[in-house]
Image (tube, rainbow, N blue to C red):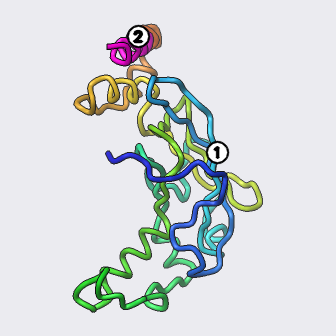
Amino acid sequence: MRPSAAKDDGRPINNLPGLYPTEDWVVHYWDVEPLGELRSRQAVIQLLRGYAGACPLVQIGQVGCVHRVRRWGVQLYTRVLQDIGFDPSLYLSHDRARFPGGDGDAEMISILIHATHFDLPAHFVIASEQYPLLLFDPQGMLKGSYTRWHTHLGALAYLVSEGRVNGTFGCVFAENRPLYDQALTYLLQALLRQENE
């Protein structure tokens, strides 16, 4: 669970700038800061032009074009690139220093991943029923959401335990809200104690 490498400079995030035409998508998400504070954020990511046309409209709770959320950001489906006819072999650099072997397979995989996997400016991205990640196409239509990743409590447990506890705690939120809230308060206090030690 590596940290995000994205800079919070307000510019659109593009892992392969200038390689192909793009369209701007907006990601709304929640970030848990180092001391446990919850922060609503948004970022613009640049996807291959045509990606919007291949993604269906969704409601919150339906993943749409969002494959996964990770602590560092969001992964979108690479299969959508195939659906719109994207051929990564047309963009190979044949840079043998970066991609030894010269057959192009490693570089094509790298292009597909960089075109659909984005670091977001954040310390710990969460995505739950209470705090969903939402993905909007250039026309502002909801084309993806994710609610099955860490809750606020899950992020705090990870931070307090320094990665030893890695659970979403979604069931606790759904089935026992008083216990969830009590645990949230306890872990927020634990983070403050760690900071002061």
State yes or no: residue 196 in magenta: yes
Q: Residue at x 37, y 13 (%)?
A: 196
Q: Residue at x 45, y 23 (%)?
A: 35
Bin the neighbour count of mark 2 within 10 Å (Cα to Cα): few under 14, some 14-19, many 20 and up.
some
CB within 8 Å, label 2 to label 1: no
Residue segment shown in magenta: 183-197
Give how far apart the Cα atoms at labels 2 and 1 are: 27 Å
- Residue 36 on image: x %, y %: 46, 23
- Residue 123 on image: x %, y %: 46, 38
| Residue carrying label 2 | 189
Q: Which numbered disc, 2 or 1, marks the residue that appears first in the sequence?
A: 1
Nearest the viewer among 6 and 178 is 6
| Residue carrying label 1 | 42
> Callout 1, which amino acid?
Gln
Q: Quadrant of the C terminus?
A: top left
Q: Which mark is residue 147?
A: none
Q: Is residue 183 left or right of residue 10?
A: left
Q: Please state which of the two labelled residues, at mark 2 or mark 1, is closer to the viewer.
A: 2
> Callout 2, which amino acid?
Gln
Q: Is residue 89 left or right of residue 142?
A: left
State yes or no: residue 17 in magenta: no
Nearest the viewer among 103 and 50 is 103
